Amino acid sequence: MEETIGNRIENEVRKQEWNITEFADAICCKRNNVYDIFKRNNLDIKLLARISKVLKHNYFKDLAEEPELAEFTVEESEKDKTNRNAVSQFFETMPDVLTRIGMRNCITFNKNEMTGENSVAFPDMILPGYMVCFTIGMRWIDKANILKNPLFAVQTLNTPDNVPIDIVENTLFGSVFIDIELDYKSEKMWENTMRFVKDNCLQYAKLPKRLY
């Protein structure tokens, strides 16, 4: 029997002696779904990102080096491959980048159980101390256009490398966060981008009024 990405995750869960219920909670899914993950040869990018963080193993790198671990449809393969490579590179470089520029390197993942169009309303990864968010393969302005939601106002700033940074305001609650598309960037470009955010964008970030 050929090894799959699900098998590899199961082996690591067993090796680290995770309780299945606790592991399910850690990756934001139900206990029964964990057993389904162990059987699968393809996983949603956001779910795989949470698993990589929890198990402290970059499974995106595994897929890049051993593509036979997963099975992809023709129409999904190129887009998914691009996004997987971007997330893999993000995991490899972002903690060091944040440390170098003097920002806390705590990266959290959004727990989003919504499906359909509403699922795009949430960012994928967050720097919670700074109200800085990352969306995989899509800018926030594209999400706002999909939702056609008048509550969100988007202002865009461009870094010297022409990386767009979206300043997103929820006009109902008064919150403002910074959103960056998580696509493939070199480590130097990520560093330049985050330095720009630190120096020029964090001043706009605000918690919702209801949390004051």
Image (spheres, rainbow, N blue to C red):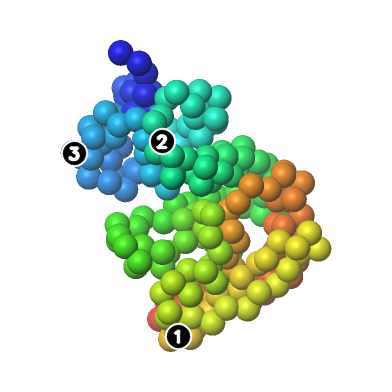
Q: Is residue 54 something one can see in this rendering? A: no
Residue 67 as seen in the image, left or right of residue 104: left
- Disc 3 and disc 2: Cα gap in Å? 24 Å
The reply to whether callout 1 and callout 3 are in contact (CB within 8 Å) is no
Mark 3, secondary structure of its residue: helix
Position of residue 134 measured from the top left corner of the image (x, y, whole percent): 55, 58
The percent position of residue 31, horizontal first and vertical second, equals 21, 40
Answer with left or right where residue 134 lies relative to residue 191.
left
**Residue plotted at (60% across, 51% down):** 183
Q: Is residue 15 left or right of residue 79?
A: left
Q: Which residue is mark 2?
A: 72
What is the x, y in percent for residue 23? 30, 37
In this rendering, the answer to whether 85 lies above or below 156 is: above
Q: Earlier in the sequence, mark 1 or mark 2?
A: 2
Residue under label 1 = 150
Q: Which residue is mark 3?
A: 32
Q: Nearer the viewer, mark 1 or mark 3?
A: 1
Q: Residue at x 55, y 24 (%)?
A: 65
Question: Disc 2 marks which amino acid?
Answer: Phe
* Dot 3 amino acid type: Asn
